Amino acid sequence: MRPGFRAAMTWLHDWTGILTGWVLLAIVLSGTLSVFRSEINVWMRPELAGRTADPVRATIAAIDWLHDHAPRSPAWYLTAANPRAPFTWAVWQQPDGPFVQHALDPASGAPDTIRDTLGGEFFYRFHFELQIPYPFGRLVAAVAAMALVLALVTGIVAHRRFFADFFTFRPHKGQRSWLDAHNLLGVTVLPFHLVIAFSGAVTLASLLLPWGILSAYRGAPAQFQDALSPAMAARPATGTPGTLAPMEPILHEAARRFGPDGIGQIYVYNPGDAAATLIAIGGNGRHVGFDSHVLRFDGTTGRILADYREHRPMISTFATLYGLHVARFAPPLTRWLYFVCGLLLAAVIASGLRLRTLRRRRQGKSTEAVERLNAGMIAGIPVAFAGYFLANRLLPATLPDRAGHEVQAVFTLWGLMLVLAAALPSATGWRVLSVLAMLALGGVAGFSAPWLNGIDQGAAIVAILLAAGFGYAASRRPAPGGRAR
């Protein structure tokens, strides 16, 4: 391979990481936590600890409650209870536009007995929306996903000793150690990182390349959605009042047809109209592909309008890539592997950001400002995310807009960490923020200390290990030039 080509790939690899590294770090860490989205949902709702729920009965209770409390909503979107999450997650649109979302009690169907929190949904949504209004957050995430694919591919080309890197680590060598760590972490689970990056980019590709859809469907995205998922289309409202059919026969029929997959989601369109439509989507716990079996019912009569299974090759390929990315099919061991590999990808990004500043310092260039921001992001994001869990336990259970205050705690802490990092010399900032991350994660472990069930145990173990890692980082004394003694 020509030296000039490798040098170009190295340059592209470095600058891709520099320009998108901080955003990618936040995306990867939140996506890693999303692997245990359901478990986080339960951890942040201790009222549900030890409970189980029948998905059909819980869904009926939720629909009854929505019938009484959101009768004029144009649509109800329900995620059925399952063994990992014994509650119904409901999202509905108010007549004036805003969406409301709550966890509903599996017995009563009401949200009153469960604390108001987004739980793991916050990390899931932040992973691809970054708490930025649609479509701008998703567009940023799409660009970052493409940048990650580019960084991984150019990294493969840039490293001459690709496989040798797997067996090379020289500690206590300053920049050399950081480069060895970066290479070792990158090579260890490279296939996983490539699949996750590519599948993430594909799922958001229509935001980056919308022209084919706009041309084929003449700027009518609703027609594209109907073509993409034919059975999901709802009938237009007639304006004539209607009453929903009894839900129990409909849901039992759906459960029978879905078989071992079970009911995954229920959508009710125009619930108070004569043209009400109920969509039942099969669960995705036993296969990689996503949303492959869909039933459509007439909401007022209960008659089946469509029993649809997706077999189109391109759509099935997309569903498989999306399924690989979100890992809803994954059994516990596979989810842990996803989680560990996600942390390794975050470590690759963080070590790359650190390595760049060390290189520029050796070249005699000023890196203090970037070093401070690195500390605010690399150590500040874990503090902010840990603060989300702590706010869940510290805020009063009946606080109005409690979920909003939990999310606000994340960005308030994150901002404070960036301000603190900017105010301190970089070496001091790294140590102070590492100590704060250790304490915050230790607090999360403390709230999981009752060891009531596997969820608390898993949360405590992960928090303790991460706290120990930040404690070790805080104990390292940087020498001049960035070499650790």
Image (cartoon, helix red, strand yellow):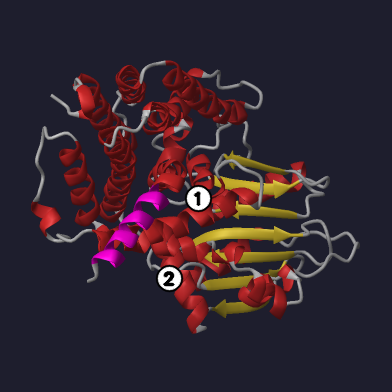
The residue that disc 1 covers is 81
Q: Is residue 267 left or right of residue 274?
A: left
- Whether 132 is drawn above or below 226: the answer is above
Question: 303 left or right of 360?
Answer: right
Main secondary structure along the magenta-highlighted residues:
helix
- Whole-percent x and y of residue 357? 32, 36
As drawn, the label of residue 320 is 2
Q: Is residue 132 visible?
A: yes
Q: Is residue 418 magenta?
A: no
Image: 394 above or below 251? above
Task: Decide which of 196, 266 is in the foreground and name it.
Answer: 196
- Among the two numbered marks 2 and 1 on one chain, the one whose residue lies closer to the N terminus: 1
- The answer to whether residue 61 is visible is no
What segment carries the magenta color? 3-17
Query: Disc 2 marks which amino acid?
Result: Thr
- Judged from this view, the residue extending furthest toward the right is 240
- Amino acid type at circle 1 is Ala
Task: Give the camera-side residue of 237 and 411.
Answer: 411
Residue 100 place in picture, x, y as percent: 69, 42
C-alpha span from label 2 to label 1 = 23 Å
